Structures are given as structure tokens and as C-alpha cells.
Amino acid sequence: MNSGNDLIAEFLDYLRYERHFSPHTGKCYAADLHQFCGFLLDRGGDPSTATSGALSHGDSSSAGAIGAGYAGGNGGGVATAAPPVAGTQAGPALRTKVLAVDTNKVREFLGYLAGLDYSKATVARKLATLRSFYKFCVKRGYKDANPVAPIRTPKQDKRLPKFLEVNQVKALLDAPNDGTLLGSRDRAMLETLYSTGIRVSELVGLNIDDVDFLGEAVIVRGKGRKERVTPIGPTALTAIRKYIELRQRDSRSPGFDQQALFVNKHGQRLSTRSVRRKLDKYLLQVGLDPDISPHTLRHTFATHMLNAGADLRSVQELLGHQSISTTQIYTHLTTNRLKEVYDQAHPRS
């Protein structure tokens, strides 16, 4: 009989090859299943001190033991489910426990998470992981029913996304010194993020050939490997063109990745982490909130578009959202802005 390790590794491969999940998402699913398995084997104890010995966070083999290993994860890496570790005592027992889980056991796990004071959003994500995993088990004939199906996702607190004001965006975009190769690259990256609203993972995945300078558009590969064509403004295109010209003049250029649009100082495709580090540098430089992330520029793009009169459906398409409900959160931001305008302008406000 296959072990529980093989079962979870099979699920991670399913996410990778059939669902085309990103490396980052795969890692999150693997980590959630890692914790759940630790809970099952240790009856709710801390997985980092699980007595089974097979699930200690400090043991690199433990992640492999339950398939918690999407290799890569820099936004452009290749995701691979880690092979199970042979000979672990947790294997057969783990599979039995995983497949024996019922709705009460899932509720018990949720109680365990509540005791650890996790946020509602984190609990909802972990529950979604289990829901997807057991749906897979039913689909493959390993279980008759999904034990997570009767459980409702906890209602989450509404949190409005942060966004930058127009003058703050201008200060940030003007911060890089575009007279240098790396400075021009950083300027082009920031301009592209704000001009298109694409995700940072989509940004680092761009190839030079994806940029249509004449048509003022870029080909973006989003979640699930879905492609979309997104408009890009002339200011961003000018910044990209300048960066490419400086890059081509560099003596090291022949050794650079000739496909990737944005590369690091060694000429290799830039990682999402590197983009975050560069952004942090310029936030400090212009005195903006250090908690701002590359994703904040995506929120800023959507908010500014809606404030300027763009319709929700168009913004949904531009952002690559599968459901318009995901895009609707930005209407709260624009409503707040309309209220401010109303209060300032209406005689009886």
C-alpha cells in the first residue's frame, strides 16, 4: 500500500500538472498539509515538536516526507513535489489517519488553529487547502465523501487594500536613476506594475517578445497559465525601451538571459523577492510607508482606474480576475473617495 507521503505528493503533482498552480501556491498548500498531518500524528500537538519525528520543521527530510516541497518558488521557478522519504514510520500510519478523517476531526483541527490564535484569513486558507485535498481524494476514489464539505468557511473581516495617492506614485516612479542599467530596469519595472496592474509574479515572467511596442500591449501569463493581453501606457513603454537599449549596450549582454525582460545583475531572470527588495529601497528613499508591497501598486492601479471612471468589468479583465466579486473590493475604496467629495461639495453634507 502507498504511504500517506505518496498520497500528498500525488496531490501536489495534481496541482502542478493538472491545475497548473504556481510554485508559491503549491508551497502554501504543502505547508498547510504539513501542519494538518502533524496534528493528526500528534493529536493536536505542535507540529514542530511532533513526537512522530517525521514532521519536525527543523528536519529537512520531514517536508519531503509529506510532499511539502514545491521546489523553486521565485515566480519563475519549476514546481516539483518532493519525493517521500523512504523508511519513515509515519508513512502507513499517516495514510490511514488522513483517509480516516471525518467532519468532526476537521472541526477539531479548526479548534486547534483557533487555540493558536490564527487570523480568520489564515484559517480560511487552511480550510480551503483541506477542502481541495479531500475533493481530490474523492475524485481519485480514495474516500467516499469529502469531510470538509459540510463545514462553512469562517466569515472574514473586511480589509480594504492599501493604495497610493497619485503624487506618491509619481515620487516612487521617479526615484530610480534611469541613467544606469539597473536604475533603468527598476524604473521600467515600477512603471510596468503601475501601468498594467499585473501581479509581481506576472511581471518577472514577462519576456522581451511579450511587449508589443506598436500595439501598446503586453502578453501576460497569469494564474493557471492563462494568457491575457493587457494594455500598457506609453510612459512605461518608453522606460522599457530605454532599459533594453542600455542592456544591449552592456558588454555582458551576450551572457544575459536573452528571453527574460527583467534580469538581475548576473543576467538571470529576476525573482519576485528581488523586486520586493528593490521596491523597499525606493520606498525608503522617498519616505513612503515601508509596508507597501509590489501588490500595492496593483491595488493602486485598480483604484485609480475606477476613480477615473473605468467600469468594474473592464478593471476585472485588466486585473485578470476570474470572478468580478474579487474586483468588487475596490468599489469600497472608490465609494469612500466619493463620500469625501460629497462631504466637501454638498451644501448640506
Image (cartoon, rainbow, N blue to C red):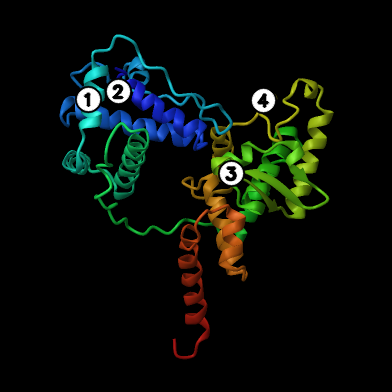
Q: Estimate the x, y position of residue 114 in percent, counting from the top left.
A: 20, 44
| Foreground: disc 3 or disc 2 | 2
For mark 4, give the secondary structure. loop
| Foreground: disc 4 or disc 2 | 2
Q: Estimate the x, y position of residue 244 in percent, counting from the top left.
A: 79, 36
**Tag shown at residue 4:** 2
N-term mark: 4 or 3: 3
Q: Distance between the residues labelled 1 and 3?
A: 37 Å
Could you say which quadrant of the image residue 222 lies in? top right
The kind of residue tagged 4 is: Gln
10 Å neighbourhood of mark 4: few (<14), some, or many (≥20)? Answer: some
Q: Marks 1 and 2: in contact by CB < 8 Å?
A: yes
| Foreground: disc 4 or disc 3 | 3
81 is higher (above) or lower (below) than 111: above
Could you say which quadrant of the image residue 317 lies in? bottom right
N-term mark: 2 or 1: 2
Q: In this view, does 163 lie to the left or right of 245?
A: left
10 Å neighbourhood of mark 2: few (<14), some, or many (≥20)? Answer: many
Query: Which residue in the structure is indicated by mark 4?
Result: 268
The kind of residue tagged 2 is: Gly
N-term mark: 1 or 4: 1
184 is higher (above) or lower (below) than 248: below
| Foreground: disc 1 or disc 3 | 1
Residue at 80% in and 48% down: 213
Query: Which residue in the structure is indicated by mark 3?
Result: 222
The kind of residue tagged 1 is: Thr
- Name the quadrant of the C terminus: bottom left
**Tag shown at residue 96:** 1
